[in-house]
Image: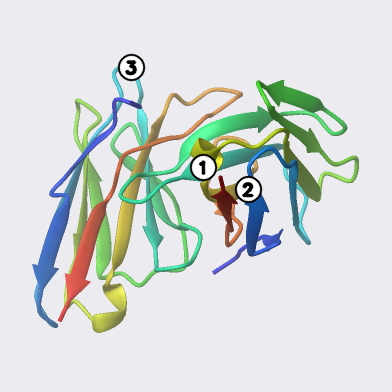
Amino acid sequence: ETGVTQSPTHLIKTRGQQVTLRCSSQSGHNTVSWYQQALGQGPQFIFQYYREEENGRGNFPPRFSGLQFPNYSSELNVNALELDDSALYLCASSLRSLRDIQYFGAGTRLSVL
Amino acid sequence: GQQLNQSPQSMFIQEGEDVSMNCTSSSIFNTWLWYKQEPGEGPVLLIALYKAGELTSNGRLTAQFGITRKDSFLNISASIPSDAGIYFCAGQMGAQKLVFGQGTRLTINP
């Protein structure tokens, strides 16, 4: 139990729609990172938020956007969904420090039809 | 996107056997981590390594941070059925993104 909770657990959308995924950080953590995990692959970094500012972004198009709130919870928004966006989306929280360990939630399984 | 080279991709072993898997990178990292993921769950941290050459144990698990900072291995001794799952290595530079391997799927026959 990492204390990182994600909602919803599963989601089905159609191509072209928009989706919002949510993440509550572990208590005391101020950094949230989002990852996309395609079937049979390792997680791929989407972006990171630290104190409500984006702090690093992976190779994902601008239709992937995020927010971090004052309580350090976070949202991942994806616009104009494509079939290839079907994946497990993982949120990880951490406390920015010299040894920045990221703790993962159970993820949101997104299916785009 | 960037991924580490993790091998083997899958392993089928008998309960009680030892397991070894490794991870290599073309880039150096300051931190190497090993996670385990089970169906319907997110990755769970097993071991974190912070210094080149460091050897760290967590119960029956032992991991090492390679001297070149471009590789790491994980050993599991005397495997048990609950060790089954997918193991991921990950490299990290400071408080930045994790770069993951493709995973090693471990299946254990009782």
Residue B67: image quadrant is top right
Q: Residues within 10 Å of mark 3 (few under 14, many from 20)?
A: few
Labels 2 and 3 share a subunit: no
The amino acid type found where label 1 is placed reads Lys
Secondary structure under badge 2? strand
Secondary structure under badge 1? strand
Residue B89: which disc? 2
Task: Quickly name the residue at label 3.
Answer: A28
Residue at 61% over, 40% down: B34
Residue B83: image quadrant is top right
| Quadrant, the N terminus of chain B | bottom right
State whether residue A4 appears in this view: yes
The amino acid type found where label 3 is placed reads Gly
Residue at 66% over, 52% down: B13
Secondary structure under badge 3? loop
Work out whether B1 lies above or below A72: below
What is the x, y in percent for residue A24? 22, 33
Residue at 75% over, 51% down: B22
Residue B32: image quadrant is top right
Q: Chain of mark 2?
A: B
What is the x, y in percent for residue B69? 82, 44
Q: CA distance from mark 1 to mark 2?
A: 9 Å
The amino acid type found where label 2 is placed reads Cys
